[in-house]
Amino acid sequence: MSYSAWFESVAGGDRRFPLNEVIYRDPATGALLEVVHDLEALGRRSAAAWMRLFDERYGRTSWPYGSGVWSKHEWVQPHVQPENVVSLYEGNTNLFWAERYGRTIGLEDLWVKQCGTSHTGSFKDLGMTVLVSSVKQMISEGKPIRALACASTGDTSAALAAYGAAAGIPVVVLLPKGKISAAQLVQPLANGAIVCSLDTDFDGCMRVVQHLTEDPHIYLANSMNSLRVEGQKTISVEIVQQFDWEVPDWVLVPGGNLGNVSAIAKGFSMMKRLGIIESLPRLVCCQAERANPLYLAYQRARAADRELAEGDFTPIEAGDTLASAIRIGHPVSLPKAIRALVETRGVVEQASEDELADAVARADRTGMFNCPHTGVALACLEKLVRRGTIRKDERVVVVSTAHGLKFTEFKARYHERKLEGLECTYANLPLEMGREPAEVSAQIHRALDARGV
Ligand SMILES: *Cc1c(COP(=O)(O)O)cnc(C)c1O
């Protein structure tokens, strides 16, 4: 294949590092790296030809292009040979027209990209297929990699454990003790990973994994490793493809470590530079009020009436939030996220615990089954529509990041009204009944009457 990509420092400079090197930061400056593609080579194929190719591959069986990620192989990791791809046919997730929920908040054209309908139940699969495939490629070239490792708030570790197991590469996951859901803990255990439950929070696990992966035989799988961004960015291409190559006006995504907001911007930006789209959507990074360092930085910049910059940011200690996967006070991908927001005239919004929990419940009542992080995005959406930032005639996409089934404790406690300090306005409990058909029927009719139907 005549396409190529390499690592460069996000801080600029023109040193290039090969993608099959074990490297996460620019050795000279310590800045994060990012994958840069040879856009000139990609541009030799016309926009129309790329769209045709991606449409031909969409959801088909020919390996590995049936995967939503690997259908964009040339844009993702051109150097990975198909036989080294580790794919569970991730991506190609439903773009759900949230007609009923949209109408309740005054939007006609609201869509939810159901990225959590995936192998491990979260959108982390999209990045992990790329990272693990790249490592398999490295191992095939003789790199002595002993294991893959990550710190996680629960979804990254589930994805890494599954893809590592599929590839036959050992996996080590570092989790903050007691701060992830039962499903998230069971997943890496089932997949046979070495699961370390650490007496600290995510930011603490991140410090440990950075130490652990100073040993080049243990490969770092956190989103600090920008290989993952290459998979996550296919969300944007897929959204545009699902709209028959039209760009939505807004894309909302919950943000914690901020790898994904930058990945989504990168996907749109790449499509624009290759002539597939003419404009960029505006991005909204949605944070939980208890883990909102980017929101605070955004407010600081706004108060001073200037563009968001790294100088506006100070790390915080993230508080206890239902949106546990975005409980992060010191996001690793901050510089990339700031660039993404500036490029897309982005907005940062926040949601309280009450707001996110009720938004989940309201949306669930229209047929969805949302995770708390998607709830953060929905609650932020409601605020932006009320405020008039998002206009009623605009096309909006909310990126739903995980499946609600991974967060059943949260949902059960909501419906049992056991979430301390929260209203739980839409709680719905089972009705206790006997076994007598006539009595049960009568009770059901009373319940229907009570609902006014
Ligand atoms: C990882 C994750 C996010 C946030 O992505 P970041 O890149 O960390 O900002 C949001 N929701 C869920 C469910 C996640 O697992």
Image (tube, grey):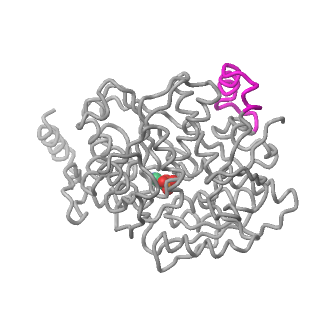
Image quadrant in which you'd find residue 394: top left
In-front residue for pair 199/213: 213
234 or 313: nearer the viewer: 313
Is residue 71 visible in the rendered image? The answer is yes
Q: Where residue 152 sits: x, y (%)?
A: 53, 65
Give the magenta part as a residue range.
Answer: 40-63
Residue 429 horizontal side relative to residue 72, left or right: left
On the rendered image, what quadrant is the N terminus found in? top right
Q: Is residue 44 magenta?
A: yes
Q: Is residue 357 magenta?
A: no
Q: How many marks are shown on the rendered structure?
A: 0
Q: Main secondary structure of the magenta part?
A: helix
**Residue at 48%, 69% in the rendered image:** 202
Residue drawn at 16 percent across, 43 percent down: 447
Quadrant showing the C terminus: top left
Q: Residue at x 54, y 36 (%)?
A: 236
**Residue 128 at least partly seen:** no
Q: Is residue 40 left or right of residue 407?
A: right
| Residue that appears at 29% across and 61% down | 413
Q: Residue furthest top?
A: 48
Give x and y (percent) for residue 396: 39, 32
Extreme-bottom residue of the structure: 199
Along the line of sight, the residue nearer the viewer: 57 or 286: 286
Say which quarter of the image contains residue 174.
Answer: bottom right
Whole-percent x, y for residue 366 in the image: 31, 37
Pinpoint residue 151: horizontal percent, then vertical percent: 56, 67
Location of residue 207 with respect to 387 vertically, above or below = below
